[in-house]
Image: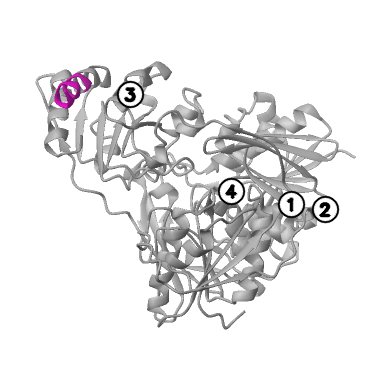
Amino acid sequence: MADGQGILVIGELAGSELALVTREALSAARSLSGALGGEPVSLVIAGADLGDAPQQGISAGADTVYTVVSPVLEGTPPDAVVAVAERAAQVASPRYVIGSKTLLGRDVLPRVAFRLGTALAQDCATLEVDSQQRLVATRPVYGGSAIAKVACLQTPAVAALRPKSVEPLEPDASRIGEIKTLDIQLDDSVVKARVVDRTERPSEGIRLEDAKVVVSGGRGLGGPEGFEPLKDLASLIGGAVGASRAVCDAGWLPSSYQVGLTGKTVTPDLYIAVGISGASQHMAGCSSARAIVAINKDAGANIFKEARFGVVGDWQKVLPAFIDQLHELLQ
Amino acid sequence: MPLRIVVTAKQVIDPETPASAFRIDPQALQVLPPASVPPVVNGFDEQAIEAALQIKDAAPDTNVTVLSIGASFAMDVMKKPLAMGADELVLVQDDALVNSPDPSVAVHVLAAAIRKLGDVDLVLCGRQASDWDNAQVPLGLAEKLGLAVTTIAKRVAVENGIARIERVLPDGSETVEITLPALVTVSNELGQARYPTLRGIMAAGRKAPTIWSVADVGLDMSSLTPGLELVGLALPESGAACEFIEGEDDADAGRKLALKLREAKLV
């Protein structure tokens, strides 16, 4: 596949809709296509039921959509999605393959890259084309302490786009594209890692990933009881509660609350960090917030480097007065 | 047949290194190891070792071999897995094994070393290394070795040739079963790895690691195809300067912060 052309996006579904991350990846692919003189953008989507997602893919920027519908894809087992993505890359013979760094993408994209004879540009914040038409990505490394720029040396290049780093295109229903069934035989034997049980623990109230306001607590809160005022604050201003990894590792809150490199990435308008020192691996999950507000007793804490407003003080004294004052203002 | 487990482990710069001691050389495209902070075994890899030792606790004849690759090693650091209870330590040491954000070479070398080790039932890896945060050597390794794979385990058990893995999901968990041989990556939700005991440290002191070169595992570096090239390295730009809100006391600062956020239309 040395002479690839065009960009293939590995799509994901959210229910029976095209996932937002895939609309973002299509938007990135269209920009890259522009830089390559208008090479075509294709999309592959696979599932037990695709609903209207293929058409949504065209509206969001795809010229060709390859579809796979199979009961084997129920619950999107990574083993099956890897097989689909590999097949789509053989058929489309692209220059670049772009996916999203999601729960599924983290399992699928490295395997796809290695099957295609290369390695993955992981967790990319930006993607661009260099003068030799190589795909070049910037990505956080060392827990966000440094930013690396990597160039993909093989064709196809494979990259995982960090969610929420690119604005999706406005859906355009007048865009014209082609929907094709991908020629692949899937049966249950492809799935080697079998899910035998799944426990969903839906978050209470607003989802962290969608929240406009996030109130997060760290080790500085001293224990699980420290989160009670944070929950009050979150419900007062319509936000969600988050936590640092130390808090989840200590068992104060379930891991679903964890914000950071290995937890959730949040992009609220306002991120209030209480008793969080701001280790780079935590900041990797919240640095895209429009404004960070920090309350911490240590004036040298890293969190203040990225905060817009800060209070150096004892959260047990700062927070109740802060909440009371907000209460008054919001009445 | 007793179970044979290989755990991959990487020596990394301590991720707790204070930001003030974190230095890069943007010309040489290198992160400079801080002089005052010793390296550590990657934290997720320690948890993978813990997962292996938990399996060994249940089936004591299990062999746990820890495998690492690199240009050089701090031997007291890399012997920690032995002190924790691992049976063997294998180091593939070669000047050519520079620490790079391209996982291609690591995948080839680790795969060749695991093949040389022979019949392996289970490969356990940390979910990612805290230096390049690539989270792809384990998955590449599974592809290269043709192993079934699952990721981000918080519990791994083996019974009758089947691995049963509890995985962390963003909003819950799931249980996955894989017929061995398989590769599983382990996440921090597994919990704190055990501390070496005094007896373990003494025993580790008497064990010599097996040291192989790249040629010993049957590879020629010049034949390995790179996938990625590092072309830039920089420190992140720090955001806008923080405006510190002060008051007569902490409570007053809290009230003023609320007024400030209202004024800035953030609430």
Q: Nearer the viewer, residue B40 or A41?
A: A41
Q: Neighbour class for label 1 at 10 Å: few (<14), some, many (≥20)? A: some
Q: How far across and down, in percent of the image, does residue A131 sit?
A: 39, 81
Q: Do labels 4 and 3 share a chain?
A: no
For this view, does A227 lie left or right of residue B177? left
Viewer-side label of 1, 2: 1
Could you tell me if residue A150 is visible in this image?
no
* The label number, if any, that marks residue B118 in the structure image: 2
Q: Do labels 1 and 3 share a chain?
A: yes
Pointer 4 indicates a residue of which chain? B
Q: Does the magenta stretch include residue A4?
A: no
The range drawn in magenta is: A323-331
Q: How far across and down, in percent of the image, does residue B147 sit?
A: 75, 54
For this view, does A325 lie left or right of residue A215? left
**Label whose residue precedes the other's in the sequence (1 or 3):** 1
Could you tell me if residue A148 is visible in this image?
yes
Q: Farthest residue in the left direction? A: B248
**According to the image, label 3 marks what residue?**
A230
Image quadrant for the N terminus of chain A? bottom right
For image coordinates 43% across by 47% down, the residue present is A143
**According to the image, label 1 marks what residue?**
A191
Q: In this view, does A102 lie above or below B194?
A: below
As measured in the structure, the alpha-carbon distance from the residue carrying label 2 to the one carrying label 4 is 21 Å
For this view, does A27 lie left or right of residue B104? left
Task: Determine the secondary structure under disc 2.
Answer: loop
Q: Do the residues labelled 4 and 3 touch (CB within 8 Å)?
A: no
For image coordinates 48% across by 53% down, the residue present is A19
Q: Do labels 2 and 3 share a chain?
A: no
**Label whose residue precedes the other's in the sequence (2 or 4):** 4
As measured in the structure, the alpha-carbon distance from the residue carrying label 1 to the one carrying label 3 is 43 Å
